[in-house]
């Protein structure tokens, strides 16, 4: 009989480097299962359906909500994002430490539905650093960067809602800290 694993939710402002830290977490700890979200955003260069995201239409997203197939969902900078519920439940039941990388509104919904989950906030070393990263990414228009920065400021203020704050001053160090939290959560 496998004991269920614990869910860890990693949140933090856009541009803080969640994706990079999660990639490093996977490398250090291949046993982790990372949820693949659904989104109405168009794929970026190099993104493939079913890998970074399940890319869906607005109508498909409506249907996912209507049939209660999302654990949480939110609108972010004009696009919708949500976590498919069943795969999360299945991997937890099978004993796989499970990681969600989502924004703040979604993290709050998971807190409501699964209060036993562990909530981790990834913070930038400074707000200036965050702006540089959002600008330097080169994938967004100026308006989109402004929308993401405005949202990022709100999100930064929410760090005290989380169980643990991890500062992303160094990707490998931050990832190792997240891995230790994932492993600790298995006990
Ligand atoms: P991006 O467009 O840069 O891939 O993601 C934008 C934001 O959406 C990021 O902060 C990311 O963490 C968040 N996000 C990705 N998937 C989900 C999801 O399933 N639910 C929620 N609430 N946010 C998500």
Image (cartoon, rainbow, N blue to C red):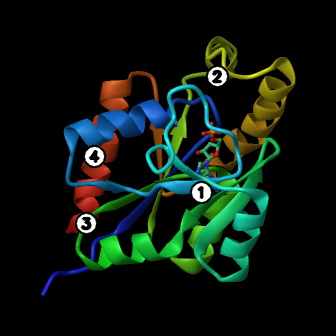
Distance from Cα at disc 2 to Cα at disc 4: 23 Å
- For the residues marked 3 and 2, what is the alpha-carbon distance in whole angstroms? 32 Å
Of label 1 and label 2, which has the lower sequence position? 1
Q: Residue at x 61, y 29 (%)?
A: 15
Residue 106, numbered label:
none
Q: Residue furthest left?
A: 1
Q: Mark 3, residues whose alpha carbon is within 10 Å: few (<14), some, or many (≥20)?
A: many
Q: CA distance from mark 1 to mark 3?
A: 21 Å
Left/right of residue 12 with respect to residue 63 in the rendered view: left
The numbered mark, 2 or 4, whose residue comes first in the sequence reads: 2
- Front residue of this view, candidates 151 and 84: 84
Task: Tell me residue 96's x, y (percent).
Answer: 25, 66
Check residue 38 in the rendering and tell me which mark sits there, or answer none. Answer: 1
Residue 136 visible from this viewpoint: yes
Of callouts 1 and 3, the N-terminal one: 1
Which mark is on residue 179? 4
Q: Are marks 4 and 1 in contact (CB under 8 Å)?
A: no
Circle 2 residue: 130
In the rendered structure, the answer to whether residue 133 lies left or right of residue 167 reads right
Report if the beta carbon of the residue with label 1 is closer than 8 angstroms to ligand 1.
yes
Query: Which residue is denoted by mark 3 in the rendering?
Result: 96
Q: Residues within 10 Å of mark 2 (few under 14, many from 20)?
A: many
**Secondary structure state at the residue bearing disc 2:** helix
Disc with the residue nearer the chain's start (3 vs 2): 3
SS for tag 3?
loop
Cα distance between the residues tagged 1 and 2 = 25 Å
Q: Say if disc 2 is inside 8 Å of ligand 1.
A: no
Comparing 14 with 81, the one in front is 81
Q: Is residue 70 above or below residue 141?
A: below
User: Is there any visible trace of residue 116 in the rendered image?
Assistant: no
User: Disc 4 or disc 3, which is closer to the eye?
Assistant: 3
């Amino acid at each position: 009989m496998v004991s269920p694993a614990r869910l860890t939710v990693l949140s933090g402002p856009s541009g803080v480097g969640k994706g990079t830290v999660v990639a490093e977490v996977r490398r250090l700890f291949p046993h982790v299962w990372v949820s693949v979200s659904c989104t109405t955003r168009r794929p970026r260069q190099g993104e493939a359906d079913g890998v970074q995201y399940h890319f869906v239409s607005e109508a498909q997203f409506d249907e996912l909500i209507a049939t209660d197939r999302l654990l949480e969902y939110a609108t972010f900078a004009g696009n919708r994002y949500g976590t498919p519920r069943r795969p999360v439940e299945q991997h937890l039941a099978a004993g796989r430490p499970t990681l969600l990388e989502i924004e703040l509104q979604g993290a709050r919904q998971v807190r409501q539905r699964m209060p036993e989950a562990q909530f981790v906030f990834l913070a930038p070393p400074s707000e200036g650093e965050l702006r540089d990263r959002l600008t330097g990414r080169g994938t967004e228009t100026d308006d989109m960067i402004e929308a993401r920065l405005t949202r990022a400021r709100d999100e930064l203020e929410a760090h005290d809602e989380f169980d643990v704050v991890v500062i992303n001053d160094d990707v490998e160090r931050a990832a190792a800290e997240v891995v230790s939290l994932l492993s600790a959560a298995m006990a």
